[in-house]
Amino acid sequence: MIDTAAGDVVVTRALGHTYGEREALRGVDLTVEAGEIFGLLGPNGSGKSTLFKILATLMKPTRGTAEILGHDVSGPPWFVRRSIGVAFQSPSLDGNLSVRENLLHQGHLHGWRGAALRQRIDELLDMFRLGDRASEVAEKLSGGLARRVDLAKALLHAPPLVLLDEPSTGLDPSARRDLWTMLDRSRRETGTTCLITTHLMEEAVGCDRVAILDQGQAVAAGRPDELTREIGGDVITLTATDAAGLAAEIRDRFDGDAVGEDGAVRLERENGATFLPDLLAAFPGRVTSSTVASPTLEDVFFHRTGRTYRADEETP
């Protein structure tokens, strides 16, 4: 295993990639520190998958640089590839082989043999609670179990960095919790650094740090709690028939930053619960419902982009 006790595992500088005339990445600067779980959060089309493929050495950037453990991913790929484990959205298992056989062949690809490989497989079967499924054919596994095996494959050669592309895809809530428990255990026991892509806000909140991508740019980066604290105050949401018109009137009357979209008005205000009665009294009969809540990462996205976060909708 390569020592990553200190320093940065992933560093990108002005990273860009273009598909024809479309810019998928527009100068992304990121740093992933050793031993952390780092999340790339963004809707479809935000550039997550392109960045993931570049880090996995599956494509070269159009401009800028990306380094893993000090090695440029655009150079000869052998060092980077032996230093990373990768799990894509769909499990890459051989359905005709058993769980143990899938792990055995993965070990052979990384040059592991004999007793050391058998011991490592037993460790992973225990870590991912797959011991009683070791002889089961992969094609008969549930989605959650298949994801466990795929993650075990990615970690088998004890890589300093594991890349997970939408790891919760197809998993039920219980399996998602198990996934995070296993990632945290791997980090604590072997010091693994983990970078995940996700479109799920609740998944991003569980990361040590997160970068929010939108239209190929990193619009925010930091600890989830730090990002939400930057907004300050509370978030008030009102539903109304004429949301755009009501938002304009609120801006004129209260000098706020109200925005109306899709039948809802959103604004940020200190002491939102105290301000709400005055707001409703100023526009009697115009508001169907109202909520006051602490800021979330969804609010951070809105604050930085001016748009509501829609995970499954392509960004323009």
Image: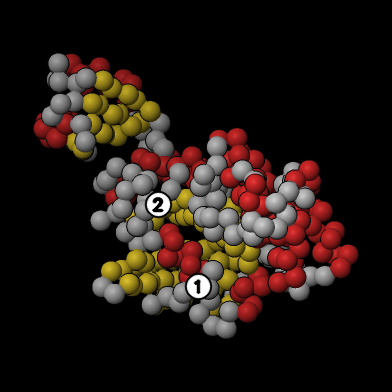
In this view, the residue in front, 277 or 176, is: 176
Q: Is residue 160 positioned above or below 66 on the image?
A: above
Q: Quadrant of residue 265?
A: top left
SS class, disc 2: loop
Q: Is residue 310 positioned above or below 98 on the image?
A: above
Disc 1 marks which residue? 58
Q: Position of residue 239 (x, y in %)?
A: 23, 26
Which residue sits at x=77%, y=50%?
Answer: 135
Q: Is residue 233 visible?
A: yes
Which residue sits at x=35%, y=40%?
Answer: 299
Residue that extends furthest to the right in the rendered view of this protein: 115
Which residue sits at x=40%, y=52%?
Answer: 42
- Kindly report the distance in space between the C-alpha atoms of the residues bearing marks 1 and 2: 21 Å
Tell me the amino acid under the disc marked 2: Gly
SS class, disc 1: loop
In this view, the residue in front, 250 or 104, is: 104
Q: Position of residue 40 (x, y in %)?
A: 47, 55
Disc 2 marks which residue? 42
**Total tally of numbered discs in the picture:** 2
Tell me the amino acid under the disc marked 1: Leu
Q: Nearer the viewer, mark 1 or mark 2?
A: 1
Residue that extends furthest to the bottom in the rendered view of this protein: 76
Q: Is residue 279 positioned above or below 123 on the image?
A: above
Q: Upstream in the sequence, badge 1 or badge 2?
A: 2
